[in-house]
Image (cartoon, helix red, strand yellow):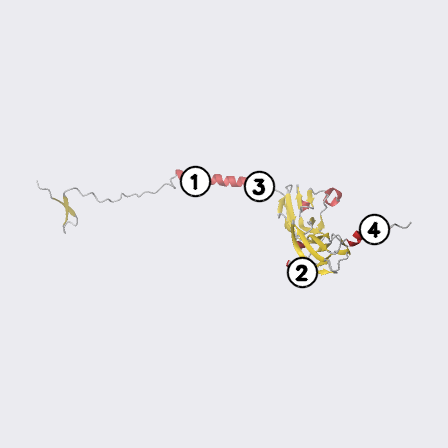
Amino acid sequence: MALGRPAVLLLLPLFGCRLLAVELTSSNTKPVVQEFQSVELSCIIKSTITPDPRIEWKKIRDGETSYVFFDNKMQGDFATRAEILSRTSLVIKNTTRMDTATYRCEVAAPSDTKTIDEINIQLTVQVKPMTPRCTVPKAVPVGKTASLHCHENEGFPKSTYSWYRNSEPLSPDTKSNAKFQNSSYTLNPTTGTLVFHAVHKGDTGRYSCIATNDAGFAKCEEQEMEVYDLNIGGIIGGVLVVVAVLVLITLGICCAYRRGYFANSKESGESYKTPAKPDGVNYIRTDDEGDFRHKSSFVI
């Protein structure tokens, strides 16, 4: 049945609103790219009747918003390494880890009934791990605890860690591998820590660690760990020798004190002192005597 005139008039505004609304879409709202590569942030105008809509791109990172494309120009450091593709999409060249953020494509179409639409693109820039820092003890006595550490903080996403002994991977589960059932260690792939709770001679070897994430991996150089027997008898004997030497030194010092070797030496002869000059006595030297003689100066 044909629609009457009033019904057509009611449907036209609804149909017109749908056609006059600016609408955006994207072929990929969560692109992932490795550092230093190029990436396209897809923003597509699905519908609009505005011939020249205004396009803006914004970057949102750590709660702060900044312009990427504004007033038909690239902004900031994007001016030399980004461009607009197919009127609305954004291409970033030579991406860095600081480009990981949310990017908002905003389109303003004044001729449309719904004049503004926006879409968010979550960009992830993956970073290969750097060479991890590995710490391996050089020598550990049998039965003691040994801790090996491996870490790097440049990779994104965060790295996981695996340990190798003599170029063979250490299993995270010692019970599932017959090779490592005699070893009492715990391996944490998240922190990169390898702990031997009680080392034995078989744990001696060259140890290395590999840090891995979705962007790649990096390895530290091998380091030797020696496990040696602890000679209890030798240690006790050495302690006794040291004690005996200290006792002999003490006895020698005591004997020396008793015999006076450490007493302060005194001058054997008496020091000559010029006799005090009595009051009223003059000293006259004669050629014959060669010495002084007394002469009274008192008048009685």
The residue positioned farthest toward the left in the image shown: 300
Secondary structure under tag 4 reads helix
Secondary structure under tag 2 reads strand
The residue mark sitting in front, 2 or 3, is 2
Q: Which mark is residue 134?
A: none
Residue 236 picture location, percent across and down: 57, 39
Q: Which kind of residue does numbered mark 1 sit on?
A: Ile
Secondary structure under tag 1 reads helix
Residue 273 picture location, percent across and down: 24, 44
Pointer 1 local density, CA inside 10 Å: few below 14, some 14–19, many at least 20: few
Which numbered disc, 2 or 3, marks the residue that appears first in the sequence?
Answer: 2
The residue positioned farthest toward the right in the image shown: 1
Residue 131 visible somewhere in the drawing: no
Q: Which kind of residue does numbered mark 4 sit on?
A: Leu
Q: Do the residues labelled 1 and 3 touch (CB within 8 Å)?
A: no
The residue mark sitting in front, 1 or 2, is 2
List the residue tagged with mark 4: 9
Which numbered disc, 4 or 1, marks the residue that appears first in the sequence?
Answer: 4
Q: Residue 235 carries which label?
A: 3
Pointer 3 local density, CA inside 10 Å: few below 14, some 14–19, many at least 20: few
Cα–Cα gap, marks 2 and 3: 78 Å
Cα–Cα gap, marks 1 and 2: 92 Å
Q: Are marks 2 and 3 in contact (CB under 8 Å)?
A: no
Q: Is residue 54 left or right of residue 259?
A: right
Q: In this view, does 29 lie above or below 256?
A: below
List the residue tagged with mark 2: 73
